[in-house]
Image: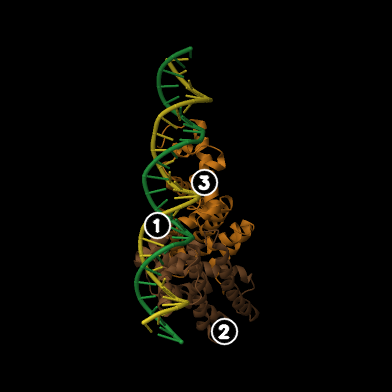
Chain colours: A orange, B brown, C green, D yellow
Amino acid sequence: MVRAKLTPRGKDRREQLLRTGASLFAERGFHPTSVSDIVGAIGVGKGVFYWYFQSKDELLSELLKSGHHELRKRQQQALGDEPDPLRRIERGISASLAWFAEHRDYFSIIQFAATDETFAPVLHRNEEIGLSDTARHLKEAMADGRIADQDPDMLARAIHGVIGRLTRDYVIERNEDVDVVAELAQSFCLRGLTG
Amino acid sequence: MVRAKLTPRGKDRREQLLRTGASLFAERGFHPTSVSDIVGAIGVGKGVFYWYFQSKDELLSELLKSGHHELRKRQQQALGDEPDPLRRIERGISASLAWFAEHRDYFSIIQFAATDETFAPVLHRNEEIGLSDTARHLKEAMADGRIADQDPDMLARAIHGVIGRLTRDYVIERNEDVDVVAELAQSFCLRGLTG
DNA sequence: TGATTCCTTGACCACCCGGTCAAGTTCTCG
DNA sequence: CGAGAACTTGACCGGGTGGTCAAGGAATCA
């Protein structure tokens, strides 16, 4: 049963479960991680888990929801009032990389959720939001004649593809400096191979 | 127990298991799909599965291995004797998209395998191979002064990021024409946004 | 202090999973 | 034809899963 009232102690425990779950899901995967693993890692009884969450699925959903919100907030903070649409894209790229560098678990969790029919729909909606943000800047840049007229949706997806891949390979796996990777991603997206 | 000798009938059954497994894994995910589901879909007893495969894991590994080989073969056929390194990259992109369009299940399976600690290492090695192919062409193009000097490994990863994303979003999910998507991917990779 | 709510325990349950295997059937080939 | 190999059956097993719950301890009120 999900509790509406949580004392400070309860909030701490809930967040501890969230953190521990995220860490184990990222490390071993969602299905191979049991609820017993999670409570065992904390050192509490299994009932604790079900005091704070209705199910294992709910914990993952909560992770997906809060992660998306945090990332989005970070991105919007980074944009500030930047008037140049191309610079807004650059800043968005940097902000995303920086956030993922600080929340590596979340990256793995997203990757899994995309492959699971239960969670893919939620994730899809989240992605759609990020994509439309990027597409908006692209449309503005096209209207200003800054970039050639092309399908903004497709360009946004290509950009996200680059970001996702470089984040995984350099930021998550190799622990490279975020600013260096961001620069590479920006340069590739803006100029391509021949630019 | 894995059998060395397979009659034609046995080969058919084995491939049927491979196909059915691939389809179910892609649809519902690996962990949520049980061996009983697979044999049930075919309408045979569970023992049949274990006559051809040592384990459920082995079926997936087999899928990963054969998929990788097929894709690679297709790519190399597409390259032919093309002397221009940039054109080789373009052809590689087209070939990959075309192959995935014909093997949608494999795309989902790869995506899952990347998130599972048991299969990620194998997948990683496969990716490394594709990446080094691309990087080779890039280095040649740099030596010829066709593209600016940059880290070829990073460029290769960015290119693969674009291909992966556009494949997923347009070819797999929206069933768009492969040639159109390939053109988009090529144009983005070569010219970027501003080129 | 007692009463109430919040939190925790961990044994327990029903279910399903991957995998085994003795027995039976079908095929191949001498 | 018969013998042996290739294939199939499906009941069965040990073990782990997500989830429940009656009972007990700790905080916070009155």
Q: Residues within 10 Å of mark 1 (few under 14, many from 20)?
A: some
Q: Nearer the viewer, residue A131 or B191?
A: A131
Task: Tell me, yes or no, whether dots 3 and 2 are on the same chain.
Answer: no
User: For the residue labelled by badge 2, is the local secondary structure a helix, a strand or a loop?
Assistant: loop
Image height of B23 relative to A4, above or below: below
Q: Earlier in the sequence, mark 1 or mark 3?
A: 3
User: What residue type is disc 3 on?
Assistant: Gly
Same subunit, labels 1 and 3: the answer reads: yes
How far apart are labels 1 and 2 at the CA level? Answer: 42 Å
Q: Given contact means CB atoms under 8 Å apart, are the residues at marks 1 and 2 in contact?
A: no
The vertical placement of A16 against D3, above or below, is above
Q: Which residue is mark 3?
A: A21
Mark 1 element type:
loop
Q: Is residue A151 visible?
A: no
Q: Nearer the viewer, residue B50 or A148?
A: B50
User: Percent position (x, y) of residue A55?
Assistant: 42, 44
Amino acid identity at mark 1:
Glu
Q: Look at mark 2 in the image and give the residue it sits on.
A: B84
- Residue A181 in view (yes/no): yes
Task: Identify which residue is drawn at 53% across, 64% down.
Answer: A162
Residue at 58%, 73% in the rendered image: B129
Disc 2 packing (10 Å; few <14; some 14–19; many ≥20) = some
Q: Chain of mark 2?
A: B
| Amino acid, disc 2 | Asp
- SS of the residue under disc 3: helix
Tally the numbered discs: 3
